[in-house]
Image (spheres, rainbow, N blue to C red):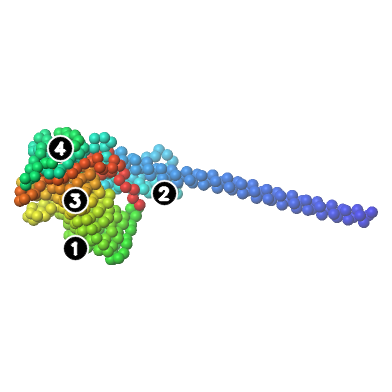
Amino acid sequence: MSWLRKNLGGFNSRVKAGALQLTLHIVIVIGLLLTAFILLVYLHKRFRLQTTFVKETVENCDRGINYSLKNRLVSNTSTPIPLNDEDYKSLSVEKTFWGAFEKITVESKVKTNQFKKVALIGASQLDINRPSLYLEETKTPLVLVGQTRLEGLNYLPAQGVKPGYISGESYSGSQLIYGASKKIQSFPKPSSEWLNYITTVSSYKDTGNFIEIEAGQSYTNSFKEPMQVIYRSGKLNLNFVELTGNIVVQSETEIVVSASTRLKDVLLIAPKITIVDNVKGAFQAIANKSIAVGKNVNLSYPSSLIVEETRISHIENSVQKKNIPIEIGNNTTISGQMIFFGQTKANNYDSQIYISEDVTINGEVYCNQNIELLGTVRGTVFAHNFIVHKGGSIYQNHLYGAKISVDALPQKYVGMLINDSEKAVAKWLY
């Protein structure tokens, strides 16, 4: 019996020790599970808070863009936008120009989260009564000849519109205007701030990061990074190269774009710019003498061709009688804006913008002097005067075979910065 009690006592001791060990293991496991649960709850809460901060950072960028659409901003200056919130949040907007558009850069910060958005901004379309034509008051009627067709709302001089003849050909339409007409009260003007930019940009030496390019190479630069500049003091030929993004190509004399080159969203600046036959791309060009576009060219939206004629280039163009500031070759399509803004000339019988037959402009054509329009504009034309050179004669304020209709332009099109026009996003940049 004593032997049995002794063995049972040892067994009981071992059972108690095992139970204690099991209990200890259970406590440890429960502790680990509780710790894991608490950690999971903490991480979930932290992740949710972090997600909220990230979402708020992005949403604040949208607030900044909307602010820039509704408020007048000072160019080249970072403008802080009050958030009426904690100090760890900040929002700033900077406005610069990129060709025909404003470039808005919004930077949002919430704690350690930072987000940046960049957009091209222009004028939005009217909801109703979009105009096809603004023709400045020159006390002469608009004369229609051949297969000319005006659609939509047209703002015309007090003398209105009438049919006419050129080289024995009369107006072939069944009515003069396929839409409505109103007497023009005032000729729309570009934004004065934008005009100042266009006037000075040709002589301005950009201080970005200068880069050298080689044929056969591709170069891309984000609009969220510092601008890159390709500069030549002499003629610059762009051959077998691909350029994309925040890149300025600048020459002191001339830039020639060949069909082997692909340009996307870049900006060209030179006194003279030549775009040869068969070029395809989407870019903007600013010159103070001339832009010549060849045949079979296709420039996608948002492209723009801008000539701001300085006093010196005006004198040179007057001497070179056959020089046309903006000339577009046959079978070319341009989606965007074509703008000429020049010095006033007495007895001006030259074309400042020449648009050939079989040319289609999807967007806007603006000229404060003479437009010779033989092609089609699906959008709006702003003209001081139309002109036709035919058979050795010059016809003032005539349209010959031209077609103008804003109805074919998408409502979402965003274009030229006119004073007091409402703004919208033309393109989100990368």
Q: Is residue 322 left or right of residue 291?
A: left
Q: Nearer the viewer, residue 230 or 296?
A: 296
Mark 2 or mark 3: which comes first in sequence? 2
| Residue 281 can be seen in this image | yes
Q: CA distance from mark 1 to mark 3?
A: 34 Å
User: Which mark, by number, is residue 391?
Assistant: none
- Residue 107 is situated, as x and y percent measured from the top left of the image, at 37, 47
Mark 4 or mark 3: which comes first in sequence? 4
| Residue found at the far bottom of this picture | 215
Circles 1 and 3: CB atoms closer than 8 Å: no
For mark 3, what is the residue? Answer: 358
User: Which mark, by number, is residue 234?
Assistant: 1
Q: Nearer the viewer, residue 71 or 253?
A: 253
Instruction: Kindly report which numbered mark, 1 or 3, lies closer to the viewer in this rendering.
Output: 3
Q: Nearer the viewer, residue 380 or 7?
A: 380
Which residue occupies 26% across, 43% down? 409
- Residue 223 is situated, as x and y percent measured from the top left of the image, at 33, 53
For mark 4, what is the residue? Answer: 174
Question: Of the residues shown, which amino acid type is indicated by label 4?
Answer: Ser
Mark 1 nearby-residue class (10 Å; few <14, some 14–19, many ≥20)? few
Which residue occupies 8% across, 41% down? 164
Mark 1 or mark 3: which comes first in sequence? 1
Mark 2 nearby-residue class (10 Å; few <14, some 14–19, many ≥20)? some
Element type where label 3 sits in the image:
loop
Circles 1 and 2: CB atoms closer than 8 Å: no
